[in-house]
Each structure stands twice: as structure tokens, then as C-alpha cells.
């Protein structure tokens, strides 16, 4: 039986450039938080450049919009990393660095184990979530779906 992993994309609208004093607290913690993810139980992959993070990537026309993507063995592993490690400290401080978006900022979906999602696919999942709400195709932590619900769509 095939195994599936959980993919995620999240985007964030910076309040200032990465080089600014305003963003310095966020930038100073990038290496720490990325290393924490890399070593987290259930971590599979994350989007990054040679610099070790994805902050140089511009996926949208807006240069102030950051993108982050990763793949995890399952929803519990991602939830543990996001809410039960030092990563949560950055979530609590996000208003210092990021604007509130009027559209979904995160989408979760399942991929076959070993698959690395493309950025275009991830952006499409955000768009799908905005258009349809949380479904097995694209969902949130608040309204999650298990892999069986996603597989049922393929039948």
C-alpha cells in the first residue's frame, strides 16, 4: 500500500524589507528555526535556496510576500513542530513582522511519499482553499482532513 505525506505552503506579507531593522528579529532566528525543522521528528523536506532558506524566492508579483513550503510524514508531526517547539515564539511575534492577509496564508494537502511539490502546485492549493474552503484537496489546521478522505476523492 502506498504511503502519503503532508505538504504545506504558507505565505507572509512582510511589513518591511528583510534588510530592515523591523525585520531583523525575524531574520536573526531563521537559521535556528530552519535547523529545528530539519531535525524535527517527521520532517521530510523544505523549500530552500543555497542560502538555506526560501526568503530570496519571489513566487508572487509582490516582492514583500515570502513563501515557505515543506513536507512532513503526517499532520501530527507538522503540528508538533509548529506549536510545540520554539517555532511558536515566531508565531506569537508575527504581528511585528507581517501584515494580516485577506486570503488564506496556509494550505495543507497530501502527496505520495517521495514526491516534492512544485511551488505552482502549492500556490494552486492556496487558491483552491480560498475558493472552496477547507476540503480534502486543500485544508487547514483548524479544519483538517485525513489521508483517507483525500484518497476517497480519487475513487
Image: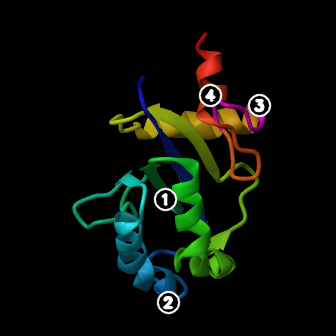
With respect to residue 104, does 48 lie above or below?
A: below
Marks 2/4 in contact by CB < 8 Å: the verdict is no
Q: Secondary structure at mark 1?
A: loop
Q: Which is nearer the N-term, disc 4 or disc 3?
A: 3
Q: Main secondary structure of the magenta part?
A: loop
Residue at the location (35% across, 65% down)? 38
Mark 3 or 2: the one toward you? 3
Display coloring: rainbow
- Residue at the farthest top position: 155
Q: Is residue 137 magenta?
A: yes
Q: Secondary structure at mark 2?
A: loop
Q: Which is nearer the N-term, disc 2 or disc 4?
A: 2
Q: Secondary structure at mark 4?
A: helix
* Crowding at mark 1 (Cα within 10 Å: few <14, some 14-19, many 20+): few
Rounded to the nearest angstrom, the CA distance separating label 1 from label 4 is 37 Å
Q: Quadrant of residue 117?
A: top left
In the picture, the quarter occupied by the N terminus is: top left
Q: Which is nearer the N-term, disc 3 or disc 2?
A: 2
Residue at the location (68% across, 68% down)? 99
Amino acid at each position: 500500500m502506498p504511503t502519503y505525506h503532508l505538504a504545506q505552503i504558507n505565505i507572509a506579507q512582510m511589513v518591511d524589507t528583510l534588510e530592515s531593522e523591523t525585520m531583523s528579529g525575524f531574520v536573526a532566528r531563521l537559521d535556528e528555526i530552519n535547523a529545528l525543522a530539519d531535525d524535527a521528528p517527521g520532517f521530510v523536506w523544505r523549500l530552500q535556496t543555497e542560502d538555506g532558506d526560501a526568503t530570496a524566492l519571489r513566487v508572487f508579483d509582490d516582492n514583500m510576500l515570502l513563501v515557505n513550503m515543506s513536507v512532513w510524514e503526517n499532520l501530527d508531526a507538522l503540528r508538533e513542530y509548529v506549536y510545540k517547539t520554539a517555532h511558536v515564539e515566531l508565531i506569537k511575534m508575527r504581528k511585528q513582522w507581517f501584515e494580516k492577509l485577506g486570503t488564506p496564508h496556509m494550505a495543507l494537502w497530501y502527496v505520495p511519499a517521495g514526491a516534492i511539490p512544485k511551488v505552482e502546485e502549492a500556490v494552486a492549493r492556496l487558491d483552491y482553499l480560498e475558493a472552496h474552503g477547507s476540503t480534502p484537496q486543500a485544508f487547514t489546521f483548524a479544519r483538517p482532513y485525513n489521508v483517507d478522505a483525500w484518497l476517497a476523492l480519487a475513487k
